[in-house]
Image (cartoon, rainbow, N blue to C red):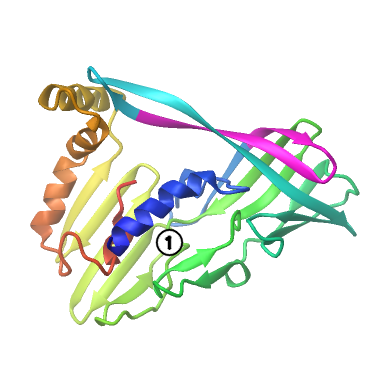
């Protein structure tokens, strides 16, 4: 399995992380700055743990060419302690993997804040030196807690996990341009990826490929086409994705990127579709 596929699998698994505040829900804004997003969940508290249930939506192309939107739920149980107005939450599978929030309360109820800090929260991945491995929930900046709800505010950039200035074994240098944009360069070759919540862009040799989130009608038509062309299959989602991304994929192939379409070094990881 190459690096590209490994990272994709890891992204899917991230939906089930403890204290996950959905890194995929953010994305740098038009100015290149981080997006601040707040999501509220129903909360239960027993004094040593608080529990909240995330509900996120997923589109799928179903039998008969019907595009459905389904709710997926994940329950998070977070051990916590409060001492000297500091709320400490266990954010991962280890008691050492914690997030600390400042507040003015001796109980869980209140407003708790922290500063997003990549240097303290993220380490360079030992296997893939051009990426950071960040603790769960590291980009949470505020938690507003009542007796029945918890609202997390996150501060996220698509480029957060990339290591600025890293040079790989083949001589490709990673440059983080802004919250949305990353550049890979080697000699006179430069490839730039730009990603937002609803768009992807690849630029090479003065040519650019752009993808924008399709309309609902376009998605529904793509699902019907997938079902018509591939009846009696349980992999309609794959064919549906192929149709949605067909023009963008062809454009990228025509760019003749300097590392190939399915490069094991994973330099194209920032350009992942999902």
Picture residue at 47% right of the left edge, 62% below the top: 160
Disc 1, SS: loop
Picture residue at 48% right of the left edge, 56% below the top: 157
Per the rendered image, the range of residues in magenta is: 40-59
In depth, the one of 41 and 127 nearer the eye is 127
Left or right, residue 94 beside residue 107: left
Picture residue at 46% right of the left edge, 64% below the top: 161
Residue 211 percent across, percent down from the top left: 24, 44
Q: Which residue is mark 1?
A: 159
To which quarter of the image does residue 242 belong?
top left
Q: Please indicate, yes or no, whether residue 26 appears anywhere in the rendered image.
A: no
Residue 256 percent across, percent down from the top left: 10, 62
Main secondary-structure element of the magenta-colored stretch: strand
To which quarter of the image does residue 163 belong?
bottom left
Residue 172 percent across, percent down from the top left: 27, 77
Left or right, residue 66 beside residue 24: left
Figure quadrant of the N terminus: bottom left
User: Is 56 inside the magenta-drawn segment?
Assistant: yes
Left or right, residue 251 beside residue 110: left
To which quarter of the image does residue 41 belong?
top right
In depth, the one of 70 and 178 nearer the eye is 70
Picture residue at 23% right of the left edge, 20% below the top: 65
Left or right, residue 9 beside residue 94: left
In depth, the one of 85 and 190 nearer the eye is 85
User: Is 27 inside the magenta-drawn segment?
Assistant: no
Residue 114 percent across, percent down from the top left: 71, 58
Residue 69 versus residue 192 in the image, above or below? above
Residue 140 versus residue 225 in the image, above or below? below
Mark 1 crowdedness (10 Å alpha carbons): few <14, some 14-19, many ≥20: many
Q: Please indicate, yes or no, whether residue 225 appears anywhere in the rendered image.
A: yes
């Amino acid at each position: 399995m190459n690096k590209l596929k490994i990272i994709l699998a890891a992204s899917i698994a991230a939906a089930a992380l403890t204290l996950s505040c959905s890194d995929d829900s953010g994305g740098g804004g038009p100015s290149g700055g981080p997006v601040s997003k707040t999501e509220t969940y129903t909360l239960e508290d027993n004094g040593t743990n608080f529990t909240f249930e995330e509900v996120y939506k997923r589109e799928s192309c179903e039998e008969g060419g019907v595009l459905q939107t389904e709710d997926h739920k994940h329950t998070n149980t977070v051990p916590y302690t409060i001492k000297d107005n500091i709320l400490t939450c266990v954010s991962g599978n280890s008691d050492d993997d914690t997030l600390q929030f400042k507040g003015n309360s001796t109980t869980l109820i209140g407003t708790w804040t922290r500063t997003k800090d990549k240097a303290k929260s993220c380490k360079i991945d030992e296997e893939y030196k051009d990426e950071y491995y960040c603790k769960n929930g590291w980009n949470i900046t505020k938690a507003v807690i009542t007796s029945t709800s918890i609202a997390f505010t996150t501060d996220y950039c698509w480029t957060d996990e990339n290591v600025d200035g890293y040079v790989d074994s083949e001589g490709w240098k990673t440059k983080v341009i802004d919250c949305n944009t990353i550049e890979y360069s080697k000699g006179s070759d430069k490839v730039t990826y730009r990603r937002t919540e609803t768009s992807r862009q690849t630029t090479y040799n003065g040519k650019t490929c752009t993808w924008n989130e399709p309309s609902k009608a376009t998605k529904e038509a793509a699902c019907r086409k997938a079902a018509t062309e591939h009846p009696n299959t349980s992999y309609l989602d794959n064919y549906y994705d192929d149709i949605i991304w067909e023009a963008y994929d062809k454009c990228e192939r025509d760019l003749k990127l300097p590392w190939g379409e399915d490069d094991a070094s994973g330099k194209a990881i920032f350009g992942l579709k999902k």
